[in-house]
Image (tube, helix red, strand yellow):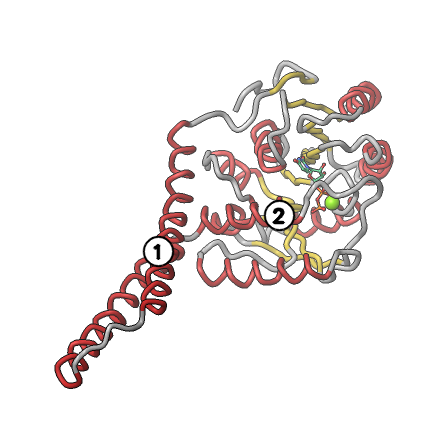
Amino acid sequence: MKKITLIVPCYNEETCLPVFDVEISKIVEQMSEYTFEILYIDDGSRDKTLETMRQICERRAYARYLSFSRNFGKEAAMYAGFSNATGDYVAVMDADLQDPPALLPEMVAILEKGEYDSVATRRVSREGEPPIRSFFARMFYKLINKISDADIVDGARDYRLMKREMVDVIVAMGEQNRFSKGIFGWIGFRTYWYAFENVERAAGETKWSFWKLLKYSIDGIISFSQVPLNIASWMGMLCTGFSLLAIIFIVVRRLLFGDAVQGWASNMCVIIFLGGLQLFCLGVMGQYIGKTYAETKKRPHYIVGECSDEQIKKIG
Ligand code: UDP
Ligand code: MG
């Protein structure tokens, strides 16, 4: 019998978890030709999430949990899930039921046909989301696909069922600055895209503020593209070319018409503009150096404070 692992990252999800448990138990019952492993990851929640997890694991033989020593973020939670998953098929599923468990039987059926290595999901609508957030999300997908080879589909979710081979590759990619949507696309494999209408959160509220998302998208771009670094050199060349032309203009004007001391204000503008440009480029380089620094330290992605069984890797 094949085993399906579902990784459920949870951060302050005490209201969602009981609902999730009920919904997922229906699917487990329905798909009786498979064994299940539901791996709950508590990402350092401050509410009763961990307690709820313990109770669920006592009741359900297929459930396991691990709890981080603090909040490490959803990316770390997914990495911990992939590292500890034992299934033949593995999927990440949000605790808020925005990744509908009801899609699972169909996703498994597609993989079983053998034509694909993974079934990924994407939202075709963004109802219930603030318009400004949708706008920036769209811009981000356009931009990152232009300047990197990560191949990210607009509206793609982390909800994706994968074969073992793919999961092993993801775990082997031990980079610190994890951006899973990019990693999934970068490693390739044959992927089937499953489209579905957006579902609103079952309970509780989103953990992503606008600024957290903005930072996440900048991290994503820097992890998968070196184009921002090239922009700095292009801007440098452009400025040099322009200033050469300006110098020629000034010399010729001086020789032909003499010179009057003028233009202090315009001079200052140019100096401040160039100073700003240089600082901006330094900042871009700093971003990359900072990421490199984090990579060289090779700190673990997560630390487990408590878990359901001895097989779980405490640090990884
Ligand atoms: N999550 C997490 N750690 C965090 C933030 C979120 O594990 O630091 C989990 C959260 O519990 C949920 C999933 O990641 O299961 C997606 O988060 P959320 O629903 O808040 O994001 P949205 O659906 O609004 O993008
Ligand atoms: Mg959600």
The residue under the point 67% across, 22% down is: 67
- Determine whether the residue tagged by mark 2 lies in a helix, strand or loop: helix
Nearest the eye: 274 or 183: 274
Asked whether mark 2 and ligand 1 are closer than 8 Å, the reply comes as yes
| Coordinates of residue 226 in the picture (x, y in percent) | 38, 53
Task: Determine whether, in the image, residue 51 is placed left or right of residue 255.
Answer: right
Question: How many other residues sit within 10 Å of disc 2, few (<14), some (14-19) or many (≥20)?
Answer: some
The residue under the point 62% across, 44% down is: 212
Q: Is residue 24 above or below residue 117?
A: above
Mark whose residue sits in front, 1 or 2: 1
| Coordinates of residue 253 in the picture (x, y in percent) | 19, 82
Task: Determine whether, in the image, residue 144 is placed left or right of residue 97.
Answer: left
Q: Which residue is mark 1?
A: 275
Numbered badge on residue 285: none
Position of the N terminus, as image quadrant, is top right
Q: Which residue is mark 2?
A: 213
- Determine whether the residue tagged by mark 1 lies in a helix, strand or loop: helix
Question: How many other residues sit within 10 Å of disc 1, few (<14), some (14-19) or many (≥20)?
Answer: few
